[in-house]
Amino acid sequence: MIDTKALRQEQIEKSRQVIRHEVFSASFTPKFIAGADVGFEKNGTVTRAAIAILQYPSLALVEYQIACIDTVLPYIPGLLSFREYPALMAAWQKLSLQPDLVMVDGQGIAHPRRFGIASHFGVLVDVPTIGVAKSRLCGEHEPIGDVQGSRQPLMDQGEQIGVVLRSKRRCNPLYISPGHKISIDRAVFWVEQCIRGYKLPEPTRWADGIASNRLFFSRKIRSIP
């Protein structure tokens, strides 16, 4: 039997390790930005994680790694990071390049216990991470404009936990929150720097496509060693 109470307590304790300010200067320019995403296969029994590393500012794909492992935990709302991080760690350990920043498809501190997958993974690998989620897990926000770049603060219990960003017109917004070693403002800044006409920033767009094994991305990555 899974001790969900213990896992929630672990989230609370580890959330205290999250650094909510950037560790690099405002003038710092990353050389490599990674995207990370997790999917599930064989009725959820296999977890498939993908990490794609893009060179900045060209955002050209320079490396990717995939790891497939047996799923370690069933889906439990609020505890998704425990289900996803083992496969992400397996993919991370395969990388030959070290990214300066990682965008994770999921929540950072925009989580009831301020410890979503971007924060969990960031603390484990000790690298700046950003949560780039497609849906809201917690918090409230004012209506967001239809113009690309429109945004609203995401608030929970009087605390700003992220930003809701319209990254592309006629698309649902993104929910951006710091994962680890980055502030809210810089998290949004770097996501916007990586938008290239799609809803998702390029790092998580590539990771999502590779993790989902979509044909377009499968064809593209054949040229990458």
Image (cartoon, rainbow, N blue to C red):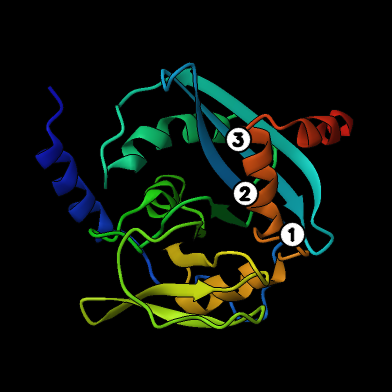
Q: Amino acid at mark 3?
A: Ala
The kind of secondary structure element at disc 2 is: strand
**Residue that carries the numbered disc 1 in the rendered image:** 31
Bin the neighbour count of mark 2 within 10 Å (Cα to Cα): few under 14, some 14-19, many 20 and up: many
Quarter of the figure with the N terminus: top left
- Place of residue 189 in the rendered image (x, y in percent of width and height, measured from the top left): 61, 76
Question: Does residue 137 lie above or below 29 as drawn?
Answer: above
Q: Tell me which residue sits at (62%, 33%) in the image.
A: 212
* Left or right, residue 195 beside residue 154: right
Residue nearest the viewer, comparing 157 with 36: 157
Asked if the residue at tag 3 contacts the one at tag 2, i.e. Cβ–Cβ closer than 8 Å, the answer is no
CB within 8 Å, label 1 to label 3: no
Q: Nearer the viewer, residue 1 or 97?
A: 1
- Residue 110 % position (x, y): 35, 64
Query: Vertically, is 31 above or below 145?
Result: above
Q: Residues within 10 Å of mark 1 (few under 14, many from 20)?
A: some
User: Is residue 21 among what the camera can see?
Assistant: no
Check disc 2 and give the amino acid type: Gly
Q: Position of residue 122 (x, y in %)?
A: 44, 52
- First-in-chain label (1 vs 3): 1
Q: Amino acid at mark 1?
A: Lys
Q: Is residue 121 left or right of residue 170?
A: left
Q: CA distance from mark 1 to mark 3?
A: 20 Å
**Nearest-to-viewer mark from 1 and 2:** 2
**Where in the figure is residue 18, as x and y percent of width and height?**
34, 61
Residue plotted at (62% across, 39% down): 51
Query: Residue 177, relative to residue 49: is it above or below?
Result: below
Viewer can see residue 132: yes
Give me the disc on residue 35: 2
Alpha carbon distance from label 2 to label 3: 8 Å
Q: Which residue is mark 3?
A: 50
Task: Report helix, strand or loop for mark 3.
Answer: strand
